Image (cartoon, rainbow, N blue to C red):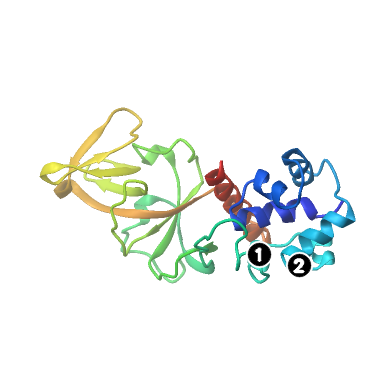
Amino acid sequence: MSFFGKNIRKIRSIQKISQSEFAELFELSRASVGSYEEGRAEPKIELINKVANHFSITLDELINKELTVNELYHFDVGSEPTFKPIDRPAFNILQIPLLDSIKELNSKSLTKEQRSIELPLSINTKNAKAILIHPHEIKSLPANLKQNDLIIIDTNSISPNEKQYFLIKTKDAIYISKLKTLAGNNILIKQCSDSITIVNIKDIDYYYPIISFMGDLPDESHSDRINRLEEQLLLLIERTLQ
């Protein structure tokens, strides 16, 4: 079995084009594109040649190797988008502190021996921190987060954005939620598990923007981790196309 299907799925994600648009580009049916991507069918050599030529990828690389997102960015796949211009984030492999609990965030006892983790992030900051999630510590938690997932925050940035999640700590509780600024220096904490919560900004110890959510990351090799996070990135991109 070739890697053609997996590679065209990544190409679509980088280009931000749907299966229907990809099918139209190469005179296929949407169902055929889906069959190739899911490994239920293999394309004819004529189609492989068309796709390789269009995106300036060799036939060998297109069918015999599962290309990474970073490798595809070195081709012409993302430099001249087929359908629409996109802002392509530059991903850096950063080594950042890995905290076992939100309670460690402002701890004064962190040392050089503090655990760290390497992650591909679209930021370049010395203030990013990865924190393991323990639901019992948090009053408000997005439904898609579970035990031992990671949140990555930037402790040097406060940029209120209603579409962004924040880690919020008050004197009484910790929340991971979207925020909305209200009158009188009040902040609405959205999507709480029990009810809508409004707190005054003077009662907030800190709130940090969440750069990204990551699924549970067990002990694994560097390459396996990058491949797994890359798959998560592609799924997120695909959801924006639906």
Residue 175 visible, this angle: yes
Percent position of residue 6, x then y? 74, 52
Q: Is residue 192 left or right of residue 35?
A: left
Q: Is tag 2's residue or tag 1's residue first in the polypeptide sequence? A: 2
Which residue is label 2 attached to? 57
| Spatial CA span between label 2 and label 1 | 9 Å
> Above or below — where is 193 with respect to 218?
above
Percent position of residue 83, x then y? 59, 56
Which image quarter holds the C terminus?
top right
Q: Amino acid at mark 1?
A: Val
What residue is drawn where x is 75% and y is 46%? 37
Extreme left residue here? Answer: 184
Percent position of residue 233, x then y? 57, 53
Whether label 2 touches label 1, CB < 8 Å: yes
Q: Which of the numbered marks, if any, corresponds to residue 77?
A: 1
Q: Is residue 183 left or right of residue 104?
A: left
What residue is drawn where x is 83% and y is 54%? 47
Q: Which of the numbered marks, if any, corresponds to residue 236?
A: none
Give the mark count: 2
Nearer-the-camera pick, 91 or 116: 91
Q: Amino acid at mark 2?
A: Ile
Q: Is residue 102 left or right of residue 148?
A: left
Disc 1 is placed on an element classified as: loop
> Above or below — where is 58 with respect to 228?
below
Residue 117 visible, this angle: no
Count neighbours of disc 1 (C-alpha within 10 A) and say few if under 14, some if 14 to 19, many if 20 or more.
Answer: many
Percent position of residue 90, x then y? 52, 68
What residue is drawn where x is 36% and y is 40%? 138
Count neighbours of disc 2 (C-alpha within 10 A) and say few if under 14, some if 14 to 19, many if 20 or more.
Answer: some
Disc 2 is placed on an element classified as: loop
